[in-house]
Amino acid sequence: MSFLGTDQADGSGLAAPAATGRGSARVVRAGFIPLVDASVLIAAAEFGFAAREGIQLDLVKDVSWANIRDRLAFRQFDVAHMLAPMTVASMLGLGSNPSPAITPFSLGRGGNAITLSVQLFRRMQSSAALTGNENALTNARALKLVIDEMRQRGEALPVLGMTYPFSSHNYELRYWLAAGGIHPDRDVKLVVVPPPMTSDALSAGAIDGFCVGAPWNMVAVSRGVGRIVAVKEDIWPSSPEKVMGMRPQWAEQHPETLARLIIALDRAAAWCDIHDNRRVLAEVLAEQRYLDAPAEIVHSVLLGKFVIDPDGTERTVPGYFSFHDDAANFPWTSQAQWIFSQMVRWGQVPYSRANAEKVRLAYRPDLYRNALAGSPSLPKVDMRIEGGSDDGFIDGAIFDAVKIPTYLAQFDIRSDASDAGKIEEI
């Protein structure tokens, strides 16, 4: 499907700008996982934004974040759709193949949700007298009641899936659980499940719930096996999600290509944020070579409108996906430091000033500013206080990146040495 044609640099129409004839196109090979939050990369390739900058953006669909990490490290990809924490983990030398990766561009905010099996949610309703209209924190506290009952009766504790140990899904799921009084390493069992397999795993009874990006929560609901109990905006609206990751050497060796790619992604992101464009975006995303999911579900979640349970209960979340507005693409170093704080909280890495400095190198606002110099919307600083009144955490916490030990000291629920290594793969 091709939408090349009319030159509309402001992204206001359905047709994207045609290539400008910069000579032979520079081929950039990009890996991605079939998720709605790959929209900006897909739009840049499909709607001509990359071509206009003289880039042939070749997209390669993959199944797991571990594959994405390894194929980037082994130079099978030039850049990749990556979990925001993956670049932080790589600079800290964490994981089975800790090859350094950086990001100069965030692919947007939003899109995650936490889904529990219908059976588990019905039990929560019975134990906590839920009506089905409660907020995310109340749902977490209801799950705590059920877990206490299960422990008293000697039942197996719930198994919850997430996509990768160094992921926003892991940290958001843990944050939600802890806010409800549930210890993520002691009161539930966490396992890794690739995003497209989460609905099948829930249906088969292999897991009792999961945290993953759209559209897989909504697919589980449409199949009658899941109930959405929280979305990303409930936990922290600005929680970093996906980024464009790359090897530092690639960025150093191809500065002009990188700058053009950032420009192309910036324009594609602005186009994706226009709601009138989201129908045609959904149709492309739904194709087998991308998400291979129902176009109506994809379109609904792009608009922040979706059904949260098999009974047909609907929820609308304004800004469920924000691809460009309010500096959504800026690589805030304060957000990288928040990710680091969660790694420390959950026992993945010790806190030290040296580690905090390594984290600073993972997010590269300097490269972003270099590519988009002159843009009136460029943030003037690299760090900010996270979790203010319009961007609150579910537990009311405030994060100051220069006071990480003080920030962590306020939490009663956190990991210790006995909790290490408790995430499994299925």
Image: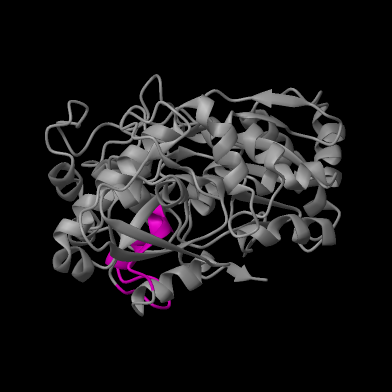
- Looking at the image, which residue sits at the far top? 389
Q: Quadrant of residue 356?
A: bottom left
Q: Is residue 389 above or below residue 67?
A: above
Which residue is at 83% across, 62% downward?
204
Residue 120 placement: quadrant: top right
**In front here: 299 or 233?**
299
Image location (x, y in percent) of residue 189: 66, 61
Exactly how many numbered labels are in the figure? 0
Q: If the image is split into quadrants, where does the C terminus sit?
A: bottom right
254 inside magenta stretch: no
Query: From the viewer's perspective, is residue 316 above or below residue 416?
Result: above
Residue 157, can we see it?
Answer: no
Coloring scheme of the render? one colour
Find the residue positioned furthest to the bottom. 74
| Occupied quadrant, residue 9 | top left
- Residue at point 86%, 54% (across, down): 153
Rendered position, 321 above or below 408? above
Q: Residue at x 62, y 58 (%)?
A: 195
> In the rendered image, is residue 398 in sight?
yes
Q: What x and y, as percent, mark residue 388? A: 35, 24
Q: Is residue 197 above or below residue 7?
A: below
219 vs 419, nearest the viewer: 219
Image x and y of residue 226, in percent = 78, 44
Q: From which residue to which does the magenta span run?
A: 77-99
> Residue 395: x and y, percent?
49, 31
In this image, 210 relative to 5: left or right? right
